């Protein structure tokens, strides 16, 4: 008898938990749908405020959805333009690099003299080359080496333009720190490419790549020294014994 009663108790407990869970799920869905209806009927200002809140909480999917609603319903004005800029940042943060860069290109074409051009240049530099992106360069193949170098060069040009055109911008200060870091990484990556060609016995390609480092005054002497060593060894393998200065 005791065993039967215990089974019934367990059955009713499970049944209660199931009903409670189902009720909460339905309530949650109703709440979310209600919120969705409210969001669609909100003013441009309140929608943008909600967008900024989701960005601050790093809720990229929700932020992106709100951005699309603003773009569709209010396709002009300052909030619209700020939303376009925020979408660039959102795409970058969620890892959609190409979408982010495409949005930058469209924004710059449409608003070449926008008041936030300094920030756009800063973002473009950061998106093209973030410091951690080069950590895998040592183990990747030549094609990825080349891609890294191209992206680093774009970042360098963005920081250079930002510093030149907007010297008093708050982003120029950060760009000055990043530009030297980017230069060092360009040199390091170019050196990897030169070494890659050398170990593939493509000595002419190795010399050409190393020459880019050896004769560029922006690069640190430690990279120049290694570049000259690669040039010397490559020339020796080609039967050219002229001393490199």
Image (tube, rainbow, N blue to C red):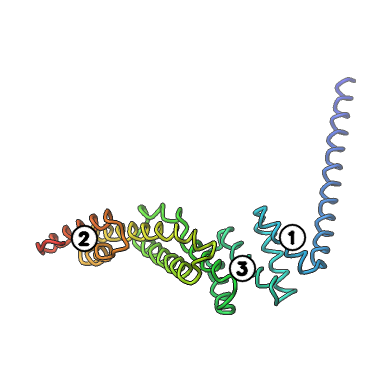
Mark 3 or mark 1: name the one nearer the start of the chain: 1
- Distance, label 3 to label 2, CA atoms, is 47 Å
Q: Is residue 41 left or right of residue 114?
A: right
**Circle 2 Cα neighbour tier, 10 Å, few/some/many (<14 / 14–19 / ≥20):** some
Quarter of image, res 12:
top right
Mark 1 or mark 2: name the one nearer the start of the chain: 1
Mark 1–mark 2 CB contact (< 8 Å): no
Quarter of image, res 68:
bottom right
Identify the disc placed on residue 50: 1
Mark toward the viewer: 1 or 2: 1
- Distance, label 1 to label 2, CA atoms, is 58 Å
Image coordinates for residue 224, horizontal then vertical, percent:
25, 58
**Circle 1 Cα neighbour tier, 10 Å, few/some/many (<14 / 14–19 / ≥20):** some
Please tell me whether residue 55 is drawn above or below residue 72 in the rendered image: above
Image coordinates for residue 172, horizontal then vertical, percent:
50, 63
Q: Is residue 46 left or right of residue 107?
A: right
Q: Which residue is at the front of the view, 191 or 32?
A: 191
Residue drawn at (59%, 66%), measured in percent from left and top?
88
**What residue sits right under mark 3 in the picture?**
85
**What residue sits right under mark 2 in the picture?**
201
Image coordinates for residue 98, horizontal then vertical, percent:
53, 67
Please tell me whether residue 135 is drawn above or below residue 124 in the rendered image: above
């Amino acid at each position: 008898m005791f065993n039967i009663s215990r089974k019934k108790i367990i059955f009713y407990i499970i049944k209660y938990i199931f009903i409670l869970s189902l009720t909460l799920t339905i309530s949650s869905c109703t709440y979310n749908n209600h919120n969705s209806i409210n969001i669609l009927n909100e003013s441009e200002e309140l929608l943008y405020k909600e967008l900024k809140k989701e960005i601050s909480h790093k809720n990229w999917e929700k932020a992106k959805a709100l951005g699309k609603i603003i773009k569709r319903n209010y396709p002009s004005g300052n909030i619209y333009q700020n939303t376009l800029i925020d979408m660039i940042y959102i795409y970058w943060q969620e890892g959609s690099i190409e979408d982010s860069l495409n949005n930058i290109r469209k924004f710059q074409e449409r608003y070449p003299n926008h008041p936030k051009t300094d920030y756009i240049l800063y973002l473009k530099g950061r998106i093209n080359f973030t410091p951690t992106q080069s950590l895998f360069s040592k183990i990747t193949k030549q094609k990825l080496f080349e891609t890294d170098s191209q992206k680093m060069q774009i970042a360098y040009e963005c920081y250079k333009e930002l510093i030149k055109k907007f010297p008093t911008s708050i982003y120029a200060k950060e760009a000055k720190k990043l530009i030297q870091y980017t230069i060092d990484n360009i040199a390091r990556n170019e050196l990897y490419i030169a070494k890659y060609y050398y170990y593939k016995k493509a000595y002419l390609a190795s010399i050409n790549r190393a020459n880019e480092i050896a004769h560029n005054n922006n690069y640190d002497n430690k990279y120049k020294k290694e570049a000259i060593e690669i040039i010397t060894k490559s020339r020796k393998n080609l039967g050219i014994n002229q001393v490199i200065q």
